[in-house]
Image: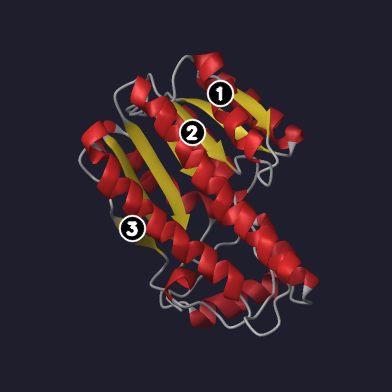
Amino acid sequence: MSKERLVGKTIVVSGGTKGVGRLAVEAFAREGARVVIGGRDERSAAESIERIREFGSDALFVHTELENVDDCRKLFDQGASRFGRIDGFFNYAGITSIASLDSCDVETFNRIMNVNFRACFFCCQEAIRHMRKVGGGSIVLTGSPHAWAGLKDRAVYACSKGVLYTLSQHVAHNYASERIRCNYLTLGWTATEGEIALKESLGESEEALRRRAAELSPMGRILEPDEYNEALIYFMSDDSSTTSGSVLNVTGGFFL
């Protein structure tokens, strides 16, 4: 039986219709939270909301185009209007592309940075604005081993994850006095729908991807999208009320 560590909380998840974000949405709800799902896949969100209501909780889907800053604001405002408060924000949304420093074009650079950094920046702005009203809250930014240099063909993605680390530290250091905390959760190589689709577009099957990950990962396998749930629940719960500015690496020992 769940301890329901998130009862009474409302948590916003950007990118909540896919991969780790979708499973986090459902994990938060199982722990008693109401969840605001930001994303573009209405069908996926509807399936999650149906399951969440079976858990005895509730959720709201807000169609969100993260390249539009107004949509970032709408995500939080509609969540607060529906549930009366915002206590947590998990920034999962992000995109990547094959782009090295010496070959990246302006369009690719702008799209990745707008979705991965600018949207997160303004979502954090909204999260802080709403969390002040309830006396604090928790923000978790999705990190990556790429943040510490990254593969050559992921230059812009690596930079976007590096700046999210800086943002996490900025929030942690400057808003602790308002009981608003922020932590950076480093995700490892994970078998999400997006990762599988990207590799298939490059000619690598899911089976081949899993074999290659098993060879390269110190722990001998690729991670599954639900393996971050416990860390996320901890960060969103009152158990982590004095934990801020931390970096938690859930990578299977894998670093770039």
Amino acid under disc 1:
Asp
**Label 3 crowd bin: few (<14), some (14–19), many (20+), radius 10 Å:** few
Q: Residues within 10 Å of mark 2 (few under 14, many from 20)?
A: some
Sequence-wise, the earlier of marks 1 and 2 is 1
Quickly name the residue at label 3. 248
Disc 1: which residue: 77
Secondary structure of residue under mark 1: helix
> In this picture, is 157 found above or below 123?
below
Q: Is residue 53 visible?
A: yes
Q: Could you tell me which secondary element the residue under label 3 belongs to?
A: strand
- CA–CA distance between discs 1 and 3? 29 Å
For image coordinates 74% across by 39% down, the residue present is 41
What residue is shown with label 2? 126
Rendered location of residue 247, percent (x, y)? 32, 58
The scheme the figure's colours follow is secondary structure
Q: Are marks 2 and 3 in contact (CB under 8 Å)?
A: no
On the image, the x and y values in percent for residue 6 come to: 37, 27
**Structural distance between the alpha carbons of marks 1 and 2:** 8 Å
